[in-house]
Amino acid sequence: MPRTSRTTRLAGAAALALAAALTLSACGSNGGGDTAAKVVQQKDNTPYQGTKLAKNFEKPDLQLTDTSGQPFDLRRQTNGHTTLLFFGYTSCPDVCPTTMGDIGVAMKSLPEEDRKKVDVVFVSTDPQRDTPKVLRTWLDSMGKDFIGLTGDLAKVKTAAKSLGIMIEDPVVNADGTVTSTHGAQVLAFLPSDDKAHVLYMSGTDVATYTHDLPLLAKGVAA
């Protein structure tokens, strides 16, 4: 079945340089009373080219299934590792493969010793179609060491919301396509406290990841 996707960008990107606060939300979500966590951009000097966060989010307490079909505890099994976390789905035609592909290219520029210190985790927002086998095949083209997780969408939505990222249930359109609306930000968790310190917006280029990954691997403070 063919599918399309809508992915979010940080609202008011042009105004972001002038406003310190923003809320990450999924494209098409009206928010209502069920709002996402608020993210504040930090203006202080930082060695990172990504966005330094004033609020350092806890790594979600999330248990799903990995690409080998085994249970995976995100918080426990990435503990003490630099972790890049992204929510998306394998049939996404644009931002998901672009984001993961760019991270994959940047990861290849790292020395092997540093690559081993970084966990890149992709959490599916379309678990009905993203089986462990489908996830593994898709991720292998970008990074054979990338971790793919799939499972209960309610758990995924709760985990993403705690980070200020909104995810909606996939919708079957009149033409038979499926739309998966999801936040498109990458969050980087440092090994020192397992909290998110740096955010990368949709459209972040390879050069930015290439610059920041050596710092992240070494756990350099943001």
Image (tube, helix red, strand yellow):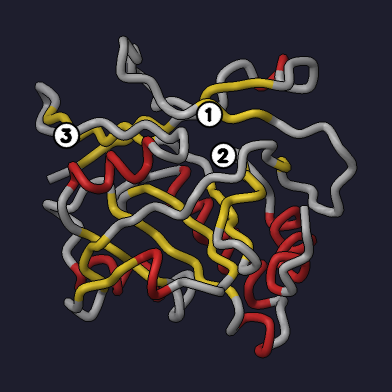
Q: Closer to us: mark 2 or mark 3?
A: 2
Mark 3 and mark 1 lie on one chain; the one further toward the N terminus is 1
Task: Please rate how many residues cluster around mark 2, counting C-alpha atoms within 10 Å: few if below 14, some from 14 to 19, many from 20.
Answer: some
Residue holding disc 1: 9
How many numbered marks appear? 3
- The amino acid at mark 1 is Arg
Q: Secondary structure at mark 3?
A: loop
Instruction: Tell me the distance, in whole angstroms, between the alpha carbons under discs 2 and 3.
Output: 23 Å
- Relative image position of residue 69 (x, y in whole percent): 17, 77
Look at discs 3 and 1 and give the one toward the viewer: 1
Q: Quadrant of residue 6?
A: top left
| Labels 3 and 1 touching (C-beta < 8 A) | no
Q: Position of residue 170 (x, y in %)?
A: 19, 35
Name the spot of residue 213 as percent of width and height, x first.
Answer: 71, 66
Relative to residue 137, is residue 196 drawn left or right? right
Q: Residue at x 78, y 22 (%)?
A: 17
Left or right side of 70 for 174: left
Residue occupying the point 73% across, 21% down = 20
Question: What residue is pinned by disc 2?
Answer: 202
Q: Earlier in the sequence, mark 2 or mark 3?
A: 3
**Disc on res. 177:** 3
- Identity, as a three-letter code, of the amino acid under mark 3: Thr
Q: Residues within 10 Å of mark 1 (few under 14, many from 20)?
A: some
Disc 1 element: loop
